[in-house]
Image (cartoon, rainbow, N blue to C red):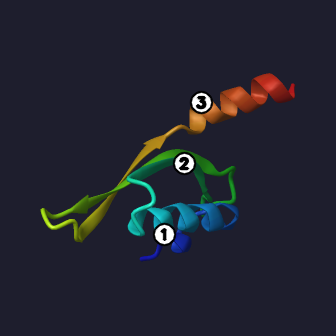
Amino acid sequence: MHFRDFSHPDDDELRLQLFEEMVAGRRDSYQLEVRYPRRNGQSDRWARLTAFLVRNAQGELECSIGMMEDITGRKHAFLKKFLT
């Protein structure tokens, strides 16, 4: 699956740009807050995505690793505090 299959379309451009910069060697990693739409139409889930590459001893790309932390509760509490 491609990340566009399950992520919010408004986050795709920046996420792809950061990943391409990482693959090109212009950054080692990136961290980004992204949204994931729920299938049932409820409000989006939020996650802090941390992505980085693993290279071999010759510097060649082996794989990419992404870790996500669910920050939905924190994000909703922040928005509620500042929007009410």
> 10 Å neighbourhood of mark 3: few (<14), some, or many (≥20)?
few
Q: Is residue 72 above or below residue 60?
A: above
Cα gap from disc 2 to disc 1, whole angstroms = 14 Å
Q: Quadrant of residue 24?
A: bottom left
Residue lying farthest to the right in this orientation: 84
Coordinates of residue 1 in the picture (x, y in percent): 42, 77
Tell me if residue 74 comes above or below residue 72 in the rendering: above
Q: Nearer the viewer, mark 3 or mark 2?
A: 2
Residue receiving disc 3: 74
| Residues at circles 2 and 1 in contact by the CB criterion of under 8 Å | no
Residue reaching furthest to the left: 57
Identify the residue shown where x is 68% and y is 34%: 76
| Residue bearing mark 1 | 20
Look at 55% across and 68% down and name the residue there: 16
SS at circle 2: strand
Instruction: Judge depth for marks 3 and 1 and give the one in front.
Output: 1
- Taking the spot 61% from the left edge, 66% from the top edge, the residue there is 12
Quarter of the rendering occupied by the C terminus: top right
Callout 2, which amino acid?
Leu
Name which residue type carries label 3: Arg
Quickly name the residue at label 2: 32
Give, as a three-letter code, the residue at label 1: Glu
Q: Is residue 58 left or right of residue 70?
A: left
- Picture coordinates of residue 70 (x, y %)? 48, 41
User: Mark 3 and mark 1: span between their CA atoms?
Assistant: 29 Å
Tag 1 or tag 3, which sits nearer the N-term? Answer: 1
In the rendered view, would you say 79 is above or below 2?
above
Identify the residue at image location x=60%, y=58%: 38
Viewer-nearest residue: 30 or 28: 28
